[in-house]
Image (cartoon, coloured by chain):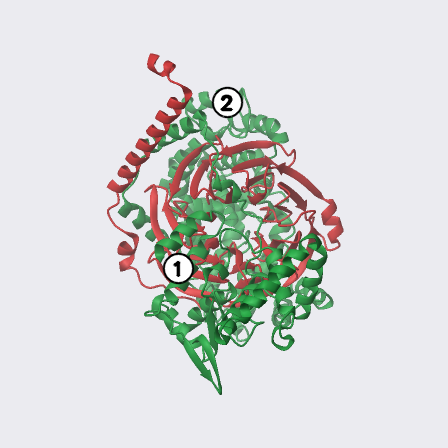
Amino acid sequence: MEASAADQGKGCTSRPLAFDKMEGLVREMQDPETGVPVRCQKLFLTSIPSAFMGYDLIEWLMDRLNIEESVEALHIGNLLCQYGYFFPVSDTKNLVVKDDSSLYRFQQTPLYWPWQNNKMPDNVEYAIYLLKRTMRNKQRHGLEEYEMEALNSLKSNLKNKWECITLQADEQVKKAKGMKKCDKIVLDSQERAFWRVNRPPPGFLNSLEYVPIPSRSRSSKPKKRSIEDVQREVDFLRRCLDRTRIKMSVALESLMQYCEMFCEWDPMVTPPQPSNPWTSEDPSFWSINSPIVEIPTEKRVRRWAISMEELVSDPTGLQEFTNYLRKEYSHENIRFWLAVNSLRRSSQREIPQRVKDIYSEFLAPGAPCEVNIDGKTMERTQQELKNPSRFTFDPAAEHVYTLLLKKDCYPRFRRSEMYKQLLAAGVQPSAKKRFFNFGPGKKKNQPQALLQQQQSTAASLSQQVQQGSLAGRRRGSDRSLSGSAHELAVSGVRDKDLNRTVSHSHSQSNLSDIPYRGDLPPACHSKVAPSIWSSLDPPGGSSDEGGGQARSTADDVCPWDSGPPRALAPEPTSQVGRTSRKNSSQLDSGGSSSDISIAIAEVSTHDGSCTP
Amino acid sequence: MAGEVTRTPDENLESLIKEADTLKARLEDERLKLNDVTLSHVAERLDMISLLNVKPRRVLRGHQAKVLCSDWCADKRHIVSSSQDGKMIIWDAFTTNKEHAVTMPTTWVMACAYAPSGNLVACGGLDNKVTVYSLTSGENVSSQNVSSQKKTVGTHTSYMSCCTFPNSDQQILTGSGDSTCALWDVESGQMLQNFHGHTGDVMALDLAPSEIGNTFVSGSCDKMVLIWDMRTGHCVQSFEGHQSDINSVKFHPSGDAVATGSDDSTCRLFDLRADKEVAVYTKESIIFGVNSVDFSVSGRLLFAGYNDYTVNVWDTLKCTRVSLLIGHENRVSCLQVSPDGTALSTGSWDCTLRIWA
């Protein structure tokens, strides 16, 4: 039995594999010894031949397929029914399986199974079937309205064949008359169920619908391969043989380590703080974790320590890192790397100009922000420059990334005071919403912090950090009192500030840099550029450039940051506006959920307005 | 050399095929040598995953026909979806509002994608083309306006089955029923690179998760998974193992492995460094094909959407099923974890999209 199913499968290249599996299963089901018990069932006074009961089927499926929950078995039963392997005896319309004593009958002959011999039943067969029914007892075999319509349209479409069709239908009706009543009932029901599946009434699910993709007809006769194709494959296989592989155990261990490490940041495994917006209807998780935030959460800052990739793939992380390097006067490396990344992704038209710009800014002799690459890489780059492309600076960027950024700058950043302070200042959103009972001390502090915030419109990073650390200490002292919504309101304001200030000059940064120099352990920077520490004032040009850099960073790395903050930090007003639009449009369910979000939005409006 | 000259081309081809077969066998040997443990064995020491209570949280209704593809916006709450009747809808999934609707001049829009900026969407299908629409922000953009700001970027010689913006609004990567993939310049419509190597319809592709990553993976009806170098256009690695069409491929968030979903009703995990299949996710009770797979952000969970209307959630390490999500009333055609991992979107032939969290 198994073998014959497999053979059939081979013949039908275009048939999805699931049909082979279903057929295998149904064959097992029909086994007289080990299958689903089929018998003549008594129902009141009538007896129903060759039928089985719903719960026998479910039990058999659970047993055979090692299913723990009956829901799953019921689901599979329903699918097999929809595909027409068996059908409810007393319901010709709905192909639904119930886990009770309701009765079902198999399509015994595989001819009535779906997708046989790689062809769908054609309209001639359908016409014969419908016509047959009109020739028989009207009460039992009368056509449904949709079947009437189908018959009429078939009649006009198959005019030239109609004689033949009538003849065949006639013959079949006659043949049926000679059959035993019991067999007739079974056969009739099977035929009817077959057409119920293959020509479903309008509005019902058609499980056998024709799908134009993938175009499998192609795969049935594979293209003849040319010598070039095979040569390419041989070359590819040779290269594969040379590939270095690692042991399975090593690979698996590292996959496991990755998962274990990131479980904490996986909202599907560890509930996010303060809450998952989709379940709580409270979008504060998103506003706290916007791409660019002034004070990132502690959890987010911790993630930056995992790897440089984690740091630079987070826009806020990248910004902090860039600022750190700027203070160290070594941010030309990260700027170069970012410029090359954006070159690779820019439109073809801009490439020549961009290549020129990058060269003159970072690589040309005496360039304003010359990056330090070795002679060999430089030579290669010069070679590539003759034919400028998206990839011209890849070797140089690779060199800068692995040797300078990853092995030198990043570890220093991770050990730096700045990072430690970011970590200490990190927001710790708590799941508990206790924002109505902050202590009196807190109320006093909050406006002050805000005031500072607003004064520093030209917020340079170190200022932000300092305030961040201030705020962090404050939070640290009375963290238990702090409420998420409160913090949300604050960070919302800060977001706005930041957006406004990005384009401003950073002239104040010199001053605010000062306290930082003391903070940094001397051992750290002595290696980089000891000379810069001798002067308190950075060279005049650098501050302006810094401003430009901040802007270009935002543009290049994450274009979505530069736009309006859109839905990321939805302001309460826009939220309400949106919901009202929703109400006006004729939409479906989910109304209740948006009501909740209005409520929340109102709460936070309230909160936000009372803070300053 | 002299011997080769006298050979007929047929003989030459034959000997090359023979050589390819020998090389394949040797390759398999090499891989087996390093096959010292199995994943479920190594993962024994791990705790069972404590499954969060994932439930349907939103139903997005509005499509009049089968939903075939969807993609999250980087803002974590907008979704673009495309359907069989040629409609493309932009949703605010959080409020379930429709923000734009575009009608395509084709049916079976099998692929759609959000650009990283959130300002563009791309889609295509049986029209063999990839078309980019600009969604300029602002409240007063009517759907007609969106339709007028469209641009055909690339054309394949068969249907387009999948597309994605490779970390840039300026480029788009497509896969097609013509068994190739291609990288296009959005502005000029120029083909920057094409990728030949599959011998069947390409059904899915996914970008490596690195910022600098220049590789992507593709899965095809030829049952092969290929890893590509976007710069050279060369295939750098290949995996086989599936017994039927591969409908979906996804990089593990670590970038070291890829997961696949196939019509053979299994999902598999292939490790790039071990250069072989490391896990098969299957169960006797699952008999229908997989249309779409995606990882949770830690890579611990693999969500897979099936033709049997369900979503199975797999523990990728213990290779066990941790949950079964039943809700859709027809095939689950597409599925994607939101960019921050807080939710899962599924699209189905029952004309709805659902958000699970």
Identity, as a three-letter code, of the amino acid under mark 1: Gly
Q: Amino acid at mark 2?
A: Glu
**Residue A528 is at least partly visible in this image:** no
> Where in the figure is residue A582, as x and y percent of width and height?
69, 65
On the rendered image, what quadrant is the N terminus of chain A found in? bottom left
- Asked if the residue at tag 2 contacts the one at tag 1, i.e. Cβ–Cβ closer than 8 Å, the answer is no
Pointer 2 residue: A384
> Quick one: which chain is red?
B
Chain ID at mark 2: A
**Same chain for the residues under marks 1 and 2 in the image:** yes
Q: Residue furthest top?
A: B2
Which chain identifier belongs to the green chain? Answer: A
The one of A303 and A254 positioned closer to us in this rendering:
A254
- Of mark 1 and mark 2, the one earlier in the sequence is 1
Determine the secondary structure under disc 1: helix
Residue A40 horizontal side relative to residue A392, left or right: left
The label shown at residue B331 is none
The percent coordinates of residue B132 (x first, y second) are 65, 43
- Occupied quadrant, residue B52: bottom left
Secondary structure of residue under mark 2: helix
Q: Nearer the viewer, residue A490 or A390?
A: A390
Image quarter for residue B33? top left
Disc ID at residue A24: 1
The structure residue drawn at horizontal position 37% and vertical position 22%, both measured from the top left corner, is: B11
Q: CA distance from mark 1 to mark 2?
A: 60 Å
Q: Please indicate whether residue B138 sits to the left or right of residue A450 in the image.
A: right
Question: What residue sits 54% from the left and 32% below the top?
Answer: B193
User: In what quadrant of the picture does the C terminus of chain A appear?
Assistant: bottom right
Q: Residue at x 43, y 36 (%)?
A: A401
Mark 1 vs mark 2: in front:
1
Q: Chain of mark 1?
A: A
Residue A546 drawn above or below residue B300: above
